[in-house]
């Protein structure tokens, strides 16, 4: 059976190793599977839930598209587009917001984390963006959605919205209920400076992350300076308890070579971190440096990137406009 895959990445700039290992590397595998129909969206409507510099946002949209392509997503096999060019997403979000319930959104933990203590000053968009995410997915009859731990709750909301719409309008299976695609053998990527914090572009220290735009020397320097502890690499996963930096670096190595964490431990047990870091640097440079080089090359050809996004948006518009037309007819518009 053909799987219809939908996923999106926010164009917030400085995509890093965590984004690659947590999402984009998996997108490439999905793109290369002939049994999949893939749609990858640059979710720029989601990005404006917090204030953006217009010029920077435009660059970041192109950079995200360039990153998709540089990592190996083929725009001839998959649709790559930016959300704001397809009006059905905003239309669908409003319609589905009238199906959603306040109680459902109040349970979304990510809003509480992002809004912080002063949630009264957060935008309505930040609060309701899981409904827009549901529209993104449901407009394309997606059967599967790649999600990390932080998005599983939003996919559950999407499933609830689809089920409620189908039940209210007595339209069995009209909105397809999507299934999550969760990566196996994947370690959550944490900061190189603090193994208890997620790797993030918002961290003030550039040494906390490996950006996909970093060159060989930058990658080497960041891994060399990555925080570790004074103990050698242990014999078992259990012995990594209370050693978050060691676990993070071993997890990064395992993810880069498509192995599990136990494989990394077996390879380097009882060795010191300087020896391990040499090998980690070698693997990271081999994987990331060519991506960095290709991203820079693509960003110098804005016309090509704009054509990819325009072509993808036309294809996405063709699919989603049919679905939104059917939705309007069902609800009486």
Image (cartoon, rainbow, N blue to C red):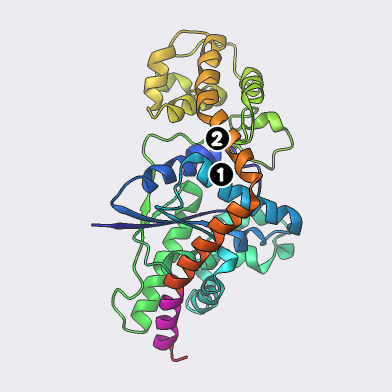
Q: Quadrant of residue 84?
A: bottom right
Q: Tell me the magenta residue range.
A: 321-330
Residue 327 magenta-drawn? yes
Residue placed at 62% from the left, 52% from the top? 62
Residue placed at 36% from the left, 45% from the top? 32
Residue 177 x, y percent position in the rendering: 34, 65
Mark 2–mark 1 CB contact (< 8 Å): yes
- For residue 44, side relative to residue 318 (left or right): right
Q: Quadrant of residue 163?
A: bottom left
Residue 183 magenta-drawn? no
**Which sits in the foreground, 255 or 191?**
255
Does residue 259 appear anywhere in the picture? yes
Q: Secondary structure beneath disc 2?
A: helix
- The first of marks 2 and 1 along the sequence is 1
The residue furthest left is: 1
Q: CA distance from mark 2 to mark 1?
A: 8 Å
> Where is 328 relative to 143, above or below?
below
Q: Residues within 10 Å of mark 1 (few under 14, many from 20)?
A: many
Residue placed at 61% from the left, 60% from the top? 44
Q: Secondary structure beneath disc 1?
A: helix
Q: Where is mark 1, residue-wise?
A: 67
- For residue 47, side relative to residue 259 (left or right): right
Residue placed at 53% from the left, 56% from the top? 308
Q: Which mark is residue 291?
A: 2
């Amino acid at each position: 059976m053909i799987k219809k895959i939908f996923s999106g990445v926010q164009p917030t700039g400085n995509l890093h190793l965590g984004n690659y290992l947590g999402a984009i590397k998996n997108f490439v595998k999905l793109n290369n599977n002939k049994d999949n129909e893939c749609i990858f969206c640059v979710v720029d409507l989601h990005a404006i839930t917090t204030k953006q510099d217009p010029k920077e946002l435009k660059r970041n949209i192109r950079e995200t598209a360039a990153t998709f392509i540089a990592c190996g997503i083929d725009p001839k096999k998959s649709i790559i587009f930016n959300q704001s060019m397809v009006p059905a997403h905003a239309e669908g979000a409003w319609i589905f917001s009238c199906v959603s319930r306040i109680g459902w959104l109040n349970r979304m933990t990510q809003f509480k984390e992002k809004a912080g203590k002063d949630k009264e000053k957060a935008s309505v968009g930040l609060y309701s963006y899981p409904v827009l995410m549901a529209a993104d997915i449901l407009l394309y009859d997606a059967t599967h959605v790649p999600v990390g731990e932080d998005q599983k709750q939003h996919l559950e909301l999407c499933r609830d919205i689809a089920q409620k719409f189908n039940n209210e309008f007595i339209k069995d299976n009209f909105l397809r209920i999507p299934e999550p695609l969760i990566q196996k053998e994947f370690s959550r990527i944490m900061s190189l400076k603090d193994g208890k914090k997620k790797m993030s572009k918002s961290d003030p220290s550039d040494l906390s992350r490996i950006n996909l735009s970093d060159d060989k020397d930058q990658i080497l320097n960041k891994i060399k300076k990555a925080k570790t502890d004074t103990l050698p690499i242990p014999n078992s996963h259990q012995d990594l308890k209370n050693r978050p930096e060691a676990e993070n670096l071993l997890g990064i190595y395992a993810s880069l070579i498509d192995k599990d964490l136990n494989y990394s431990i077996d390879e380097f047990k009882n060795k010191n971190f300087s020896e391990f870091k040499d090998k980690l640097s070698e693997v990271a440079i081999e994987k990331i440096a060519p991506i960095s080089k290709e991203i820079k090359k693509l960003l110098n050809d804005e016309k090509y990137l704009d054509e990819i996004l325009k072509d993808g948006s036309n294809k996405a518009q063709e699919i989603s406009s049919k679905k939104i037309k059917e939705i309007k007819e069902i609800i009486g518009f």
